[in-house]
Every structure is written in structure tokens, then in C-alpha cells.
Image (tube, helix red, strand yellow):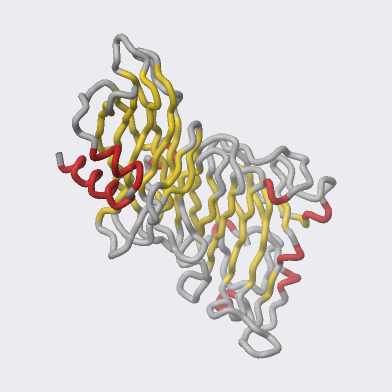
Amino acid sequence: MRGLERFLKGAVSAGGLLGVMCLSMNASAGEITASVTVSPGSQQGVSLSVPPSSEPLASYSVTVTSLSTANTIQRARFLAVSSVAGGQAGATAQFKSSTGYTCVPTNIERTAIDCAIGSLAPGQSSQPFTVTFTAPTSGSAINLSWRAEFDNGDGLSNGYGEATAIVLNPIDPDKVLSDVPAFTSVDFFTGGGVATSIDTWVTRVSIFTSLVPTQATVEENQNALNECVTGQAADLLTCSITSLSIPNATFGTPGEAIPGQFLKITLLRDASTIAKGAKISSAKIFYSKDGQTGFVEVFPCSSSPTGGPTAGVPCEDLTKRTAYPRKNGPKTPVAPGYEGDWGFTIYATDNGKYLN
């Protein structure tokens, strides 16, 4: 009963309809149930969030089923409350989105949700759907207590349970993982999001929309001297690589001149890896598509026939290439941590490696 007790406690704090429904224990149970499993994109765990803009996602796959043998059940719904194991005070996994059915948060913390399923014939199951939560900033796992209910006008009938926890991976300077639900935006970065003399190479990824659910994995090698290529700027003191893997994902339509519909990848290089007097205009980014050997240079989006990336051909937005001032001052303002760093913005449609 511990899972149910925790669910009721969270649901009562939500107030309103959710609290009333979850406290209605006088009806018979067992006429409705749900299958709640960790989505494929979350089975390897997801990374913790890092304020202000890295928010990896975690998802559950849900199917609600009528166990009635005679009657169509009306107003079926799925309710759930997320919690964080091992987190600091105030750590929450907040509701982000749902696919397949409409789910709405029912408390201020956005940890309790109510998903309207509708009518189910005897023995019928709902279409599978996904509920997605934002990873907290601390903790070891996301837990989900759930309840399936319906109301035929003579009281509530329900089933309840607790889903398998989704593991939370600690912040890693060289790796970040996130679930990527379909039709949901997600932003995340490696490490703390700012390049430093210790974490000299940082990758930021923005996924505006994917047509299919998947998982994103970013891994870095910050001293990849064995993979350096001819033509890399001689005034860089290190050779760094970002490997991006988002299996089976489809981003926009190749040939669209709308960079915002594609992957946005920002690469940040720390000042400690740049030789004195180096010019960012001499820097080059190289790309190796999955399944291919060798690297090719990434050219400006302005030279692309479409103004953006095409299949297997990413491009760089030179208007966003940035050499940050070395010192903060009234005439050369720079955010703390960015002094002297370089930044590059790339749009792409494919997985692969980026080298600088």
C-alpha cells in the first residue's frame, strides 16, 4: 500500500478533482487497469537538469485497459504523481507534455497529472500514449505512482500501481542523455553549459521537434588528437569532438530553408585551448556522418542552396559565430565564464561527429 499512500498524499496536495477522485474509495476496484512502462528513450536513464536551459526529459509509455466483461466504461482517465528519490529539498520532476491523449497538470508543482481517455468497450485498451517529465536538478531516480479510473455515474472504479523508476544520471562534463518524445522540444547541454579550463569543450543541443520518439545521447572527447584532421586551425591547442546520436529521428524535411526546424548544435571552446592572438575566422568545423569514414568541412548555411542543412550536410550559421571578449567591461560586456571563449552554431538533420 505504500505506493498508493504516496499517490494519495501527492494527489491531495493537488486539490480539486484529482483529490476528490483519489479519495473516493467506496467503489469496487479492478475493473480498469493500466500498463505503465519506461519509454525506450528513457531506459538508459536520463541526465539531471542544469539551470537555466538544460532540461533533459524522461518519459513513460501508458496503455489503459477496461477489465469489464459486460459494460462500456465512461469517462476513463489516467492520473499520476511523480516524485524524486534521493533529491535535495524541493527537487521535482515536472510534467512537460503528453502524446496521444490530453494530459493536464493538476497542482502548482506540475507533478500531478490528469489524462482524459474517454469511453472503453468491454476488454478494450486505449491507444498507447506517452507522458513526459522534466528531469530534476538533483536525485537518483524519478518515481511515478499512478491510478486508472472511470465514472459510469454511480461512483468510481479504479486500479492503481507504481511504475518502474527512471534512473537519473549525474551531471557529466562529457556526456548527456535525454528522452526525445515526438513533437516535443527539448534543450540540454554537457557539463555545466559553459566551457572552463577543466571542461574545455561544451555541447549544447536544441531539438525543436522530432517526428518519432527516440533518445538523444551526446558524448565528447576533449583531447581527440588521434582524430585531428588536416586543415584544423593551427592556433588551437586541443582537438575536440562531439558525437551526437539520436536514432531513427526525423527533423524537418531536407531542403527546407527553415533552420529552426532542424537540430541546433552549439559548440563552445574555452579560452585556455586557444593560442594567444588566434582569430576565430581561421577556425573550421568538420563533420563525419554516422556510417562514413573521415571528416568533411562544415560550410556556411549562406552557401547552401536551401539556406539550411540538407541530408548528410550540416551547415554553420556564421552570423552566430562568436569570439567572446577576453575581459568584461562597459564597452565589451561578456557573461562570466565566457571570457575569451569561442562559440559555433550548427544546423543539421543527421547524427554524426563534429570536430574542431
Furthest residue toward bottom: 330
Furthest residue toward front: 154
Q: Residue at x 43, y 52 (%)?
A: 134
Task: In this rendered view, identify the residue nearer to me: 204 or 199.
Answer: 204
Q: Residue 144: which quarter of the image? A: top left
User: Where residue 248 sits: x, y (%)?
Assistant: 56, 35
Q: Is residue 184 left or right of residue 281?
A: left
Answer above or below: position of 27 versus 44: above
Q: Residue at x 43, y 48 (%)?
A: 95
Q: Is residue 240 left or right of residue 30?
A: right
- Which quadrant is home to the C terminus? bottom right
User: Where residue 304 sits: x, y (%)?
Assistant: 81, 49
Q: Residue 155: which quarter of the image? A: top left
- Which quadrant is home to the N terminus? top left
Q: Residue at x 27, y 48 (%)?
A: 12
Answer above or below: position of 250 versus 207: above
Task: In this rendered view, identify the residue nearer to me: 306 or 314.
Answer: 306
User: Where residue 318 sits: x, y (%)?
Assistant: 76, 63
Tell me how many marks there are.
Answer: 0
Furthest residue toward left: 1
Task: In this rendered view, identify the residue nearer to me: 44 or 95.
Answer: 95
User: Where residue 150 sits: x, y (%)?
Assistant: 34, 27
Q: Is residue 84 left or right of residue 180?
A: left
Furthest residue toward top: 70
Task: In this rendered view, identify the residue nearer to me: 108 or 314.
Answer: 108
